[in-house]
Image (spheres, rainbow, N blue to C red):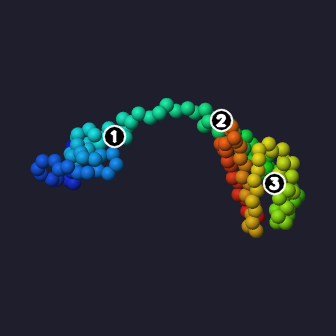
Amino acid sequence: MYYHPFVYGHQGPPRTVLYPGYYSNITRHSVFPDQGAYYSYPYNRKLPEVDPTLFNESAIEMRMLMRDASLILAKLADSREFAKKVMAAAQASNDEEVQKLLNSTGIKSKVHTTFNPDGINFKLSAGIGGTKASQLTIALRWR
């Protein structure tokens, strides 16, 4: 069996060592492997019962966001004319026109669009019960 020199190199009775946080006045020998406390601390905690309801609903919403993102990307990739219109409207800071063009792709989720001289960002978001449960950001460069 391997013995770590720091732990077992000291001869004599165990000394009291103050460990911040979880251990306060415990001997150093009692928190190392042969004494059992070292292996048992993080693994014997009682965790609360999990409820995957919101997690599941968030995954469902993300699936819809990805479908909408796929619609936007397909339209931008398949139609140079559409991409040119979006780019021109974005560079002219015409938010309403950009939103109208994106909505014409058939998306159902809300899209917040930001743009700069180098590219455009689409942030698609979906909410469950008034909270933002899922967000998907797409960043595309044009320069």
Q: How far apart, in angstroms, are the residues tagged by discs 2 and 3?
A: 29 Å
Position of residue 40 relative to residue 102, above or below, is above
Q: Amino acid at mark 2?
A: Glu
Tag of residue 41 = 1
Q: Seen in the image, is 133 located left or right of residue 89? A: left
Q: Which residue is drawn at the image coordinates 67% and 47% (left, top)?
A: 135
Q: Tell me if residue 79 can be seen.
A: no
Q: Residue 59: where, in percent of width, then height? A: 65, 38
Tag of residue 49 = none
Q: Amino acid at mark 3?
A: Leu
Q: Secondary structure at mark 1?
A: loop
First in residue order: circle 1 vs circle 2: 1
Q: Pointer 2: residues within 10 angstroms few (<14), some, or many (20+)?
A: some
CB contact under 8 Å: marks 2 and 3: no
Position of residue 59 relative to residue 5, above or below, is above
CB contact under 8 Å: marks 1 and 3: no
Q: How far apart, in angstroms, are the residues tagged by discs 1 and 2?
A: 34 Å
Q: Seen in the image, is 24 located left or right of residue 118? A: left
Q: Amino acid at mark 1?
A: Tyr
Q: Which residue is mark 3?
A: 76
Residue 129, quarter of the rendered image = top right
Q: Which residue is mark 2?
A: 57
